[in-house]
Image: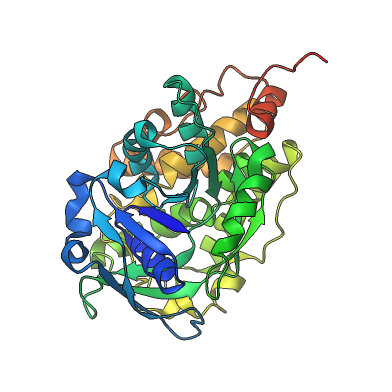
Amino acid sequence: MKIAVMGGGNNAQTMAADFALAGFKVNLCDLPQFSKNIEPMMNSRQIEKYGSVGTVGQTGLAKLEKVTTNVGDAIKGVKVITLAVPAFGQMAFYKALAPNLEKDQIVVTLPGNWGALKLFNLLKKMRIKKNVNIAETDRCAFICRKAESFLGPGKARVVMERHSIQIAAMPAKNTGAVLDVLKTLNHVGFPKLIPATNVIETSLNNSNIIVHGPIVLMNTGWLEFTEGKFMIYRDGATPSIGRCVDAIRNERNTLLEALGISSQSNEPFYEEIIKSRWVHDPCELGPSSLKHRYITEDIPFGLVPMSNLGDKLNVTTPVSDAMIELASVANQVNYWKEGITLEKLGLSGLKPEEILRLVNEGYTKEKKA
């Protein structure tokens, strides 16, 4: 099967190498304005994948079919398109993908961050009907890094493999059909794909939006003084910060339950972190400023829509709201306004039952028998 991997960052490069080593024909593509991300591979068409302690997936030199900035060329004749870019980069890719999509292709955004719903709305607005299946996951496929200083460009390293990740189609009625095709992606080292209820569950279950606000904002003094030269999880995750993370997770779980979605039972954050091996990895240094995607992505694209949804469902989210407010003041950006609001997702005028009908069935009004 042919796979097109969209993006040039950590997960895009790691997935491209991983898929190629597993025997798939892989095209890697980033947008022209971000060509520097993939320049080292454009001539060689190779990525070397490294592992860490405990890595079980294949490592070594992966040979790619194409490395390009031409989206149309990258997805031509491809069955599965994966998109692994920050949430603030999704729409640029969706707009480039939309006119080039072919019949029966599958587009999977890893992680979703409401991306599947955004692409669904865009294709509907553009009146593109090619039976394209849209899906998203709750998390990235790997914790990984590319082009680290001790390895250099053209090399990607898996820090930790995930056992499983959740996936949902938009609408959810298509999740089974998507999984029937994506089950061929299952190979050693790649996470098992578990069906989620719908894209609300995948978008809210991204652990980054729960963790990054407290661990960065509550370490701001240390972060700015050291310019991030400390182990953000090993040294920055303290019991009090863990309680704030747990509080946001509880808000998220209450929100899911209000929508009839069973929430995951998680170990308290601090207890989980102190037992985790990956938190000691040299890549897990703190960000050098608050203008980092731990804030600029996870607050406006994670906590803002969660808070908006809470307002609609009469579920209070005081700790999440505090993180949004603090981040807005600290970065001098109104994340309440700049974030992904329900209005921007096309959900603001809908009743809760209409939102659920949309993400589950693809339409809002109940059809007459």
Q: Position of residue 16 (x, y in %)?
A: 37, 63
Q: Is residue 61 left or right of residue 180?
A: left
Q: Is residue 319 above or below residue 217?
A: above
Q: Is residue 335 left or right of residue 134?
A: left
Q: How many numbered discs?
A: 0
Q: Position of residue 252 (x, y in %)?
A: 63, 46
Foreground pick, 22 / 366: 22
Q: Quadrant of residue 327?
A: top left
Residue 222 appears anywhere in the view: yes
Q: Is residue 231 above or below residue 310?
A: below
Q: Residue at x 39, y 63 (%)?
A: 25
Foreground pick, 227 / 166: 166
* Residue furthest bottom as drawn: 53
Foreground pick, 352 / 27: 27
Q: Position of residue 137 (x, y in %)?
A: 55, 51
Q: Is residue 251 above or below residue 313?
A: below
Q: Position of residue 289 (x, y in %)?
A: 26, 56
Q: Is residue 205 above or below residue 274?
A: above
Q: Residue at x 62, y 33 (%)?
A: 310
* Residue furthest top as drawn: 368
Q: Residue at x 73, y 43 (%)?
A: 261
Q: Quadrant of residue 150?
A: bottom left
Q: Quadrant of residue 366?
A: top right
Q: Residue at x 83, y 15 (%)?
A: 369
Residue 236 appears anywhere in the view: no
Q: Is residue 309 left or right of residue 30?
A: right
* Residue furthest front as drawn: 77
* Chosen colour scheme: rainbow
